[in-house]
Amino acid sequence: MLQKAQIFSLDLQTAVNQQQGPYYFLLFSTCKWSSYIVHMDKSLMPKAFASHEIWYSTTINSVKTQNLESSPSLIYTYDHTFHGFSALLSKDELESIKKSPGFVSAYSDRKVTLDTTHTSEFLSLNPTTGLWPASDYGKDVIIGLIDTGIWPESASFKDDGMSEIPSRWKGTCEVGQEFNASNCNLKLIGARYFNKGVIAGNPNITLSMNSARDTEGHGTHTSSTAAGNYVEGVSYYGYASGTARGMAPKARLAMYKVLWDEGGYASDVLAGMDQAVADGVDIISISLGFDDLPLYEDPIAIASFGAMERGVLVSCSAGNGYPDLGYLHNGSPWVLTVAAGSIDRRPSGRLILGNGLSLTGWTMFPAKAFVKDVPLFYSKNVSDCETAEQLALVPTDAVIICYNKYSAALEMLSFVSNSDAVAGIIISDDQSLYEFNKFPYPGVVISPEQGLEVIKYAQTTSKPTATITFQETFLGTKPAPVVAAYSCRGPSGSNPSILKPDIMAPGTLVVAAWSPNVHSSIIWPNIELSSDFTAITGTSMACPHVSGIAALLKGAHPEWSPAAIRSAIMTTANPLDNTQQQIRDVGTDFDAATPLAMGAGQVDPNRALNPGLIYDATTQDYVNFLCANNFTRNQIYTITRSNNNCSTPSSDLNYPSFISLYNSTLASNTVVTTVDYFTRTVTNVGDGAATYKAKVEAPKGAVVTVSPDTLVFEKRYEKLSYSISIAFTGDKNGTVTFGSLTWIEENSKNTVRSPIVVSPYVNQWE
């Protein structure tokens, strides 16, 4: 049976752009049976069955035929985040299942595609004040990672200073290939692996590592970023040296390995999330996602709804791809969706010319190379550094200057590596360069402005020379953060009426633990280097930062719901960079970043500790939202697992942001006024009575009205509501405009900010 290929990406930019980790594609299948995920209405289970497992098994057995080529078999049963099972079925057997009592919906299992030392300081976490001491560094909060596994011997997972495991924990350390129960400890309290889906989809495969051990590095990196213990003396080959630690150093970790060297399937992801909730995690961190799927077929959206019902916050990456609108995944309103930005740290080298001029450039060459007083070579005929003929003109033992405004810096460096040059000076203003960790040949990248001085020196000096030093790091670089070019933008195709992403966190060249059996850098042409820590890039790296911060907030405010934690993180975010200007976007040539790229802004952990007001939401609120958005009863049941009451549908979810969509297919000279109305309810979580006044920064071309514009709370936990209208008049030419609504507390520093976006409706699925 032919199946449509679906992309399920692990949000690691380097996996695609630097061949770091496998990259899988779903091949079309001609098998007579395939894996399906089936949703059932557990309330209709006949009383004759003692458990849902027996009911599901009996249902599958009832559709078996005499056809020996067909062999329906159960893969997983699910009961915590949704009700149902996955099974290997023929098309006819699936049709028979659909006629069984309690059937809700079914869809094909989908194959997977693989999509620190300074960040805590960059985010202002410190041991004396704020969120770290208030939460006791996340003590006893349990973070579940849905990922590629874990390298338990990493120093980031030592349990020094950890107390006994909380008695509420129900998980286990599952024994497997090269993984024993003793690999877990007071920090890594659980490790499980789920591979029935990938085996069912590939019956003849032999898994290279049939256990929770990480053979790709991704899961080890995300785990240590979220909650790694303190490790001193860490660096990436001499760059970014310091003490590594996760956002929540005292939190517990549990790994649920669902992705394999041989691929991965949605059924395994569902099984991992289902088990994580059953085991008792408080936070789920999942740096992967499904592209181009409606909410009722997106396994992460479905499982995270069940997790939310159990009080578990799910933190997801926004995805890696293009800076164009509408490619974001994980747009469910009940998850926290994280975009990626840069850090104020730059790995560097120093270029010193023979005349004494010293310039700082960018390099990540992973060694302390010896390039001292080497002849400097520049020729207009060779400066492109592109062809073999040009490179043949380069003298042996020289430093070559390359300047080609049409080529990326790393492309020019690769050309230099094929010459006799000792090193290369690359002149480039390619900003995306700073997102990658590969620098396989000695060299340094400098700006065009710096390059003019270097070229002038080379042309006017009889015997020009150059010295390059490596393994330097500069902190406090400006501007920072900037939105990364690879970070996917909203609106989400699955749910455009909710502004996504929610928040931005560090994702570019994040240093964290790594699996030492996976190369972390390379020296040309074929020397692969191993390290216990590496610097990699992606929204995968941003997500666990926020997962760890959510764990800190859970530790400080155990009574807060997932929606309350998300609200505190969003409404206290910072939309400004370290120059106190609007955060810029690398993907749009450093224009001001819109909330469709960065959400509410850069996460600010300490301010999130005391947000003043929160926007909370219940399970029924989400159900009402689904009811109002043209979902069928079966589709709603698939997500919610119950026949919830749709008597009060409302598309106006109590969310801490606002998005007004317009039809961009109208002629560019068409001027139309659109008006959207919203109602929000805020809860006072301050110390007592408080008065807040509204401050509006309206998007260009919009009129924003708030009523009332003053909220007077008489006591803590009091709830008050307000309404807001956004009237937009202008050319519907695809422009995104944005502003904000900020509630400012009188006689206090509390400000509660919500981004406002007016955007064209974008559907990349069409």
Image (cartoon, rainbow, N blue to C red):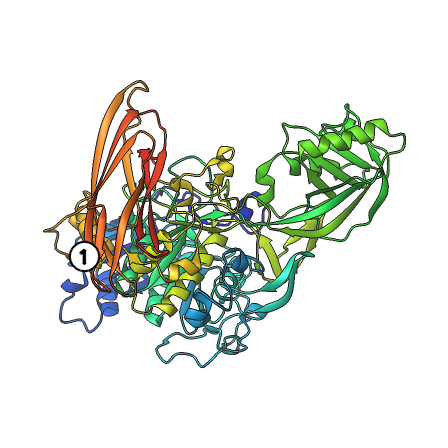
Q: Quadrant of the C terminus?
A: top left
Furthest residue in direction left, as rendered: 647
The image shows residue 598 at horizontal and vertical percentages of 42, 44
Q: Is residue 195 visible?
A: no
Q: Is residue 6 visible?
A: yes
**Front residue of 391 and 341:** 341
Q: Is residue 308 left or right of residue 149?
A: left
Q: Is residue 563 left or right of residue 714?
A: right
Q: Quadrant of the N terminus?
A: top left
Quadrant of residue 418 within the rendered picture: top right
From the viewer's perspective, is residue 379 above or below residue 10?
above
The residue at the point 77 percent across, 29 percent down is 455
Q: Residues within 10 Å of mark 1 (few under 14, many from 20)?
A: some
The residue at the point 23 percent across, 27 percent down is 673
The image shows residue 238 at horizontal and vertical percentages of 69, 57
The image shows residue 484 at horizontal and vertical percentages of 50, 43
The image shows residue 477 at horizontal and vertical percentages of 60, 47
Residue under label 1, please give it. 620
Furthest residue in direction front, as rendered: 747
**Front residue of 234 and 69:** 234
Query: Disc 1 residue type?
Result: Gln
From the viewer's perspective, is residue 572 above or below residue 740?
below
**Front residue of 308 and 24:** 308
Furthest residue in direction top, as rendered: 669
Q: Is residue 759 left or right of residue 476?
A: left
The residue at the point 35 percent across, 71 percent down is 280
